[in-house]
Image (cartoon, helix red, strand yellow):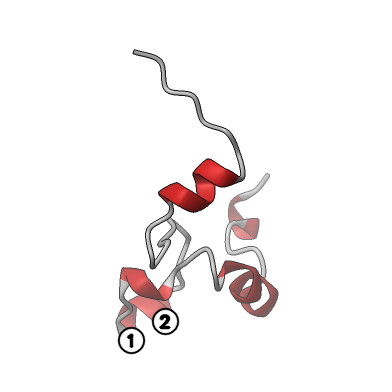
């Protein structure tokens, strides 16, 4: 069975209320404790503006 995904409507209809995402965290955030609900598609743009590219030190 094929799954057809149409960006836009399906993305909105299939989104979960918290819309959690995978994202890098700092050691300070790990020490302070964080919950996956702290990392959502709704706050990721602001997080990147505040913290910058946390993968930058790993790039060659």
- Residue situated in front as seen by the camera: 54 or 42: 42
In this image, 21 relative to 45: left or right? Answer: left
Q: Quadrant of residue 18?
A: bottom left
The reply to whether dot 1 and dot 2 touch (C-beta < 8 Å) is: yes
* Quadrant placement of the C terminus: top right
* Residue at image coords 42%, 22%: 3
In this image, 4 relative to 57: left or right? Answer: left
* Residue at image coords 40%, 15%: 2
**SS assignment at label 2:** helix
Query: CA gap, disc 1 to disc 2?
Result: 6 Å
Q: Position of residue 39 (x, y in %)?
A: 44, 69
Disc 2 crowd, CA 10 A, few/some/many (<14, 14-19, 20+): few
- Residue situated in front as seen by the camera: 14 or 57: 14
- As drawn, the residue found furthest toward the bottom would be 32
Q: Position of residue 4 (x, y in %)?
A: 49, 24
- Tell me the residue that label 2 is attached to: 28
Q: Position of residue 56 (x, y in %)?
A: 65, 58
- Residue situated in front as seen by the camera: 19 or 58: 19
Vertical comparison of 39 with 31: above or below:
above
* Residue at image coords 43%, 54%: 15
* Residue at image coords 62%, 59%: 57
- As drawn, the residue found furthest toward the top would be 1
Vertical comparison of 50 with 16: above or below:
below
Question: For the image shown, how many numbered marks are present on the structure?
Answer: 2
**SS assignment at label 1:** helix
What is the number of the mark on residue 32?
1
What is the number of the mark on residue 49?
none
Q: Position of residue 8 (x, y in %)?
A: 61, 45
In this image, 48 relative to 35: left or right? Answer: right
Disc 1 crowd, CA 10 A, few/some/many (<14, 14-19, 20+): few
């Amino acid at each position: 069975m094929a799954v057809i995904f149409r960006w836009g409507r399906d993305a909105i209809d299939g989104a979960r209320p918290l819309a959690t995402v995978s994202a890098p965290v700092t050691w300070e955030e790990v020490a302070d404790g964080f919950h996956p609900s702290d990392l959502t598609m709704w706050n990721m743009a602001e997080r990147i503006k505040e913290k910058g590219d946390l993968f930058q030190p790993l790039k060659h």
